Amino acid sequence: MSYFEQFMQANQAYVALHGQLNLPLKPKTRVAIVTCMDSRLHVAQALGLALGDAHILRNAGGRVTEDMIRSLVISQQQMGTREIVVLHHTDCGAQTFENGPFQEYLKEELGVDVSDQDFLPFQDIEESVREDMQALSSLL
């Protein structure tokens, strides 16, 4: 059985279990969480959240990017969230590379020039959270 088929079966079981909950569109806690896409991180479980409690927005490193800001504006202005949590974590993949060498790698491997792309790697978790909070405070 393919992963896609497994996902479809799991989704059918999920709908059977949760499909009749009729949860409101707006998150109950009025909180949006910006966090990492790391597959080891189950944010809802880690924070004791249930379905419908919060918006959980994920990307590589849990960084505040242009698209993350787009989602946060929608979350706040259309869905009623009033707090933003920036949640980074230890042993993050975004700590394993630097822009320059990664850009060179992509040029060699894929033949694309991404020299103007900041992939937002970081070494210091606390500093990366401060940077993202600063980005948010200047925009929202």
Image (spheres, helix red, strand yellow):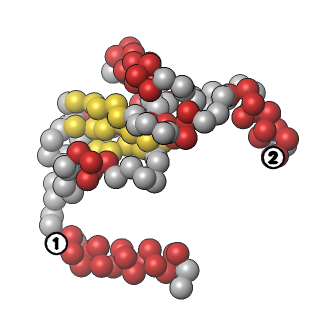
Mark 1 crowdedness (10 Å alpha carbons): few <14, some 14-19, many ≥20: few
Q: Please tell me which residue is depicted at 77% across the width and 40% down the height of the picture.
A: 106
On the image, numbered disc 1 is attached to which residue? 20
Can you tell which mark lies on residue 129? none
User: Real-space Cα distance between discs 2 and 1?
Assistant: 46 Å
Does 132 sit above or below residue 40? above
Q: Is residue 103 left or right of residue 35?
A: right
Q: Which residue is disc 2 drawn over? A: 110
Of badges 2 and 1, nearer the viewer stands 2
Disc 2, SS: helix
Q: Position of residue 20 (x, y in %)?
A: 16, 72
Q: Position of residue 137 (x, y in %)?
A: 34, 16
Q: Nearer the viewer, residue 124 or 67?
A: 124
Tell me the kind of residue under disc 1. Answer: Gln
Q: Position of residue 29 (x, y in %)?
A: 15, 41
Q: Residue at x 33, y 79 (%)?
A: 12
Nearest the eye: 4 or 67: 4
